[in-house]
Amino acid sequence: MPDEWRIRVKLIVSFPRPRKVDSEAELYQYAVGALGRRMRTVAELKRLLRPRVDLETEYGQTLINLVIRRLKDQGYLNDSKYAAAFSTLRRDNEKFGRIRVITDLKAKGVHGEVIEKAVTDAYGEVNEEKLARDYLKRKRTQKPKDQKQAARIFRQLMRAGFGSKTIFKILKTWDVDEEVLSALENEEPAAC
């Protein structure tokens, strides 16, 4: 067992650092490859490119900016399109609520105005209660039998990005006791 542990530690320690590049063409090829694997925001791509250049020099920072500008001009990098696609996919596939999508996009470095437009377009005509029910169905969640299960469902829906009004509507239709609902209402700020 200890030998296996040493091998794992050695593999982790000997993992090579990204190779530094000093030409725009090499950095561009790396960036295109990264975008070919999956869509990224400008902030995500910059984070990915930083270890590949010498950031202490003005040349390294200029290289990143040149590559980002070139990718934007060619249409390979567009935060608006990314946010729109991300919002739609999270709504349709994951059944997440509006709040969760906004939080995730902020974490990915998308600007507030872009987020607001994309989320408004994606969730404009969506019935939040129906989406929350679809989320619960997707997760195979059943009607709570006690206070503990009701609290678990409440927190689950909060993490999925649904508003407390929607969550309480669903719990009321499941005939959750009023005492439990008032206890959950007091818990709400801690769950966010």
Image (cartoon, grey):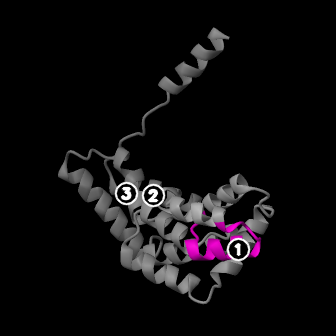
Contact check, label 2 and label 3, Cβ < 8 Å:
no
Q: CA distance from mark 3 to mark 1?
A: 47 Å
Residue name at image x 74 percent, y 73 percent:
134
Q: Which residue is mark 3?
A: 46
* Label 3 element class: helix
Of the numbered discs 2 and 3, the one sitting upstream in the chain is: 2
Label 2 sits on what residue type? Ala
Does residue 162 appear in the picture of this structure? yes
Q: Quadrant of residue 165?
A: bottom right
User: Mark 2 = which residue?
Assistant: 31
Asked whether, in this view, residue 36 is left or right of residue 129, the answer is left
**Where does residue 118 sit, x and y in percent of width and height?**
49, 80
Q: Nearer the viewer, mark 1 or mark 2?
A: 1
The amino acid pointed to by label 1 is: Lys
Residue furthest bottom as drawn: 125
Check disc 2 and report its element: helix, strand or loop: helix
Q: In the image shown, does 144 or 58 lie closer to the viewer? A: 144
Quadrant position of the N terminus in the picture? top right
Determine whether 142 is above or below 120 in the image.
above
Q: On the image, numbered disc 1 is attached to which residue? A: 172
As rendered, which of 186 and 15 lies closer to the eye? 186
Amino acid type, mark 3: Lys
Kindly indicate the quadrant of the structure image that contains residue 180: bottom right
Q: Which residue reaches farthest front?
A: 179
- Position of residue 22 relative to residue 6, above or below, is below
Nearer the observer, disc 2 or disc 3? Answer: 3
Contact (Cβ within 8 Å) of mark 3 with mark 1? no
Asked which secondary structure carries label 1, the reply is helix
> Residue at position x 33%, y 52% from top?
23
Q: Spatial distance from mark 1 to mark 2, Cα to Cα?
A: 50 Å
